[in-house]
Image: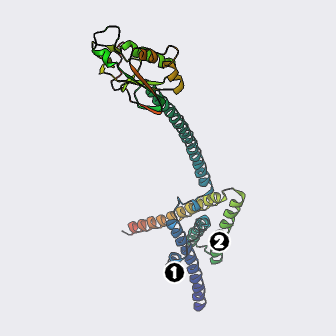
């Protein structure tokens, strides 16, 4: 009887021991899993959490995408602006260069003629009033003729003639752009060579008239006439 | 002897559990529900011991069957997209509290009786 009871007890002990073993095993396994798992890791998330996360990311993605598009559009705009700006700048630059050339602020070169007028030296010294020295009028007439023949740039003794240039005469010498010049007068003009030449020579050209008065006029055609830039400063005071 | 068996079982189980490989987090819910079911059975067993109607077969069968059944229910819940394990959890934890109350009352009554007897003796 005693033995039977102890046997039952042994069976009971073993069974309960196994049961408690199983319980503890599972519990500690679970503890370990919970402890070691990173809940924020995507592979460990529950479906509902994942869904929330996914929508979250989707919204974020959409927002960022929108901003990205905006930025791309802006970049494109800037690019366009830059290109058009460059174009404008180039246009302006060429225009500026051309205007400077026409204004006389740059040295120019081109085909044209060179007129050298040698004053009649005898006339300058003589008291005979019928023979006159070269006056500013002569030069102005020649300038008119040259402009009329389509001259693009003219200089007298290296002084560039611009819109505001003055050619005046003082007692014994002439003044161009405020600088004194003397004979020989070298007039350089850029333009069509034959037009320019024919404008001063023949059919009432002033060069012929000057020659009749005893001055020496030589005209040289040149493929490369070089005309210096205007040396003074172009200032305006009244133009507004 | 039974106490020794329980202690040995607990220690061995804890050691093995601590050295076991980590199972995926997705499946850990099955283990958790099994643990709760087993704990419920344990408290039920203690209650029955106190009530002196403890039966080893009923205890062991309840211990394992409840665990397996709860795991099966949880699995079914996952397949049905319904959190059945919550219902199982409510039942198990509720029963655990009921059993705990019974155990607590039993011991308090025992203690009170003892004191009353001692007072009477004095």
Which residue is depicted at the point 32% across and 14% down? A123
In this picture, is A194 found above or below B19?
above
Q: Which residue is mark 1?
A: B12
Mark 1: secondary structure: helix
Q: Position of residue B64 (x, y in %)?
A: 64, 73
Q: How is the image coloured?
A: rainbow
Q: Nearer the viewer, residue B66 or A195?
A: A195
Q: Position of residue B102 (x, y in %)?
A: 54, 63
Q: Which residue is mark 2?
A: B62
Residue A98 visible to an observer of this rendering: yes
Asked whether the residues under the numbered discs 2 and 1 touch, taking CB atoms below 8 Å apart as contact, a structural biologist would say: no
- Could you tell me which chain the residue with mark 2 belongs to? B
Distance between mark 2 and mark 1 Cα atoms: 22 Å
User: Which callout, 2 or 1, points at the residue further toward the start of the chain?
Assistant: 1
Q: Nearer the viewer, residue B77 or A193?
A: A193
In this picture, is A56 found above or below A80?
below
């Amino acid at each position: 009887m005693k033995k039977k009871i102890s046997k039952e007890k042994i069976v009971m002990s073993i069974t309960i021991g196994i049961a408690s073993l199983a319980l503890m095993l599972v519990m500690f396994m679970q503890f370990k899993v919970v402890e070691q798992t990173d809940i924020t890791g995507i592979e460990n998330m529950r479906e509902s959490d994942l869904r929330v996360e996914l929508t979250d990311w989707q919204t974020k993605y959409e927002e960022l995408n929108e901003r990205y598009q905006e930025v791309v559009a802006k970049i494109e705009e800037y690019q366009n602006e830059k290109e058009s700006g460059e174009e404008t700048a180039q246009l302006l630059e060429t225009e500026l260069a051309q205007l400077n050339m026409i204004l006389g602020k740059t040295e120019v070169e081109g085909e044209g003629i060179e007129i050298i007028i040698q004053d009649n030296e005898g006339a300058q010294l003589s008291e005979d009033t019928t023979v006159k020295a070269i006056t500013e009028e002569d030069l102005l007439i020649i300038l008119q003729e040259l402009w009329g023949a389509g001259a693009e740039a003219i200089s007298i003794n290296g002084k560039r003639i611009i819109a505001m240039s003055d050619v005046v005469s003082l007692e014994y010498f002439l003044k161009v752009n405020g600088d004194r010049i003397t004979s020989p007068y070298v007039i350089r003009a850029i333009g069509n060579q034959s037009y320019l030449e024919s404008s001063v020579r023949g059919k009432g050209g002033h060069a012929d008239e000057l020659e009749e008065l005893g001055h020496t006029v030589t005209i040289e055609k040149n493929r490369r006439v070089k005309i210096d830039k205007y040396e003074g400063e172009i200032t305006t005071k009244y133009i507004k | 002897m039974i106490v020794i068996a329980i202690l040995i079982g607990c220690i061995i189980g804890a050691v093995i559990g601590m050295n076991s490989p980590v199972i995926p987090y997705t499946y850990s819910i099955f283990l958790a529900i099994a643990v709760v079911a087993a704990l419920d059975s344990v408290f039920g067993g203690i209650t029955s011991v106190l009530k002196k109607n403890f039966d080893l077969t009923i205890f062991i069968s309840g211990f394992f069957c409840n665990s397996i059944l709860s795991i099966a229910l949880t699995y079914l819940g996952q397949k049905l997209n319904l959190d059945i394990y919550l219902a199982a959890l409510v039942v198990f934890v509720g029963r655990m509290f009921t059993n705990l109350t019974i155990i607590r009352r039993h011991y308090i009554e025992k203690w009170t009786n003892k004191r009353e007897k001692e007072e009477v003796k004095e």
